[in-house]
Image (tube, rainbow, N blue to C red):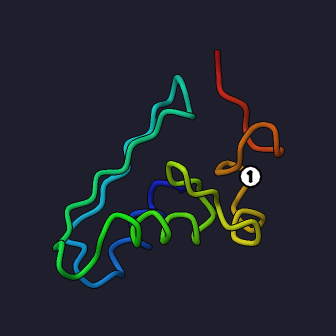
Amino acid sequence: MCKNKIEEVLKRYDGIMSATVKLNKTDPTKRQTTVKYITDRVNEEVIKAAIANAGYDANEIAANPESYKSLPKCCKKPDDGGIPKKH
């Protein structure tokens, strides 16, 4: 669910050719988003801001608090009532 949301949000931006989120099921803190984009239309800071505005942390940019609150439980951090990682 989280993977799809991030990919859909990013693909709405002019200049983003593709966005792929890879989840790490053994360690949910290790996720990676690969974005192919046209540099004269969009940049890395805009991409990180888009992810943060959708409610997810993007490297050093923290998630928008209001957007984070509206995420489904499966997309939240375990400390915030999200689903804990499996051992």
The residue carrying mark 1 is 73
Left or right, 1 with respect to 48, comes to right
Amino acid found under the numbered disc labelled 1:
Lys
Task: Establish if 66 lies above or below 24.
Answer: below
Quarter of the rendering occupied by the C terminus: top right
Residue drawn at (70%, 59%), measured in percent from left and top?
Answer: 72
Q: Residue at x 34, y 64 (%)?
A: 44
Where 26 falls versus 46 (above or below)? above
Residue 65 % position (x, y)? 75, 66
- Residue 43 picture quarter: bottom left
Q: Is residue 85 above or below residue 35?
A: above
For residue 20, above or below residue 69:
above
- Asked if residue 65 lies left or right of residue 81, the reply is left
Counting from the top left corner in percent of width and height, residue 1 is at 53, 56
Pick the residue in front: 44 or 1.
44
Kindly identify the residue that appears in the image at 64 percent across and 51 percent down. Answer: 75
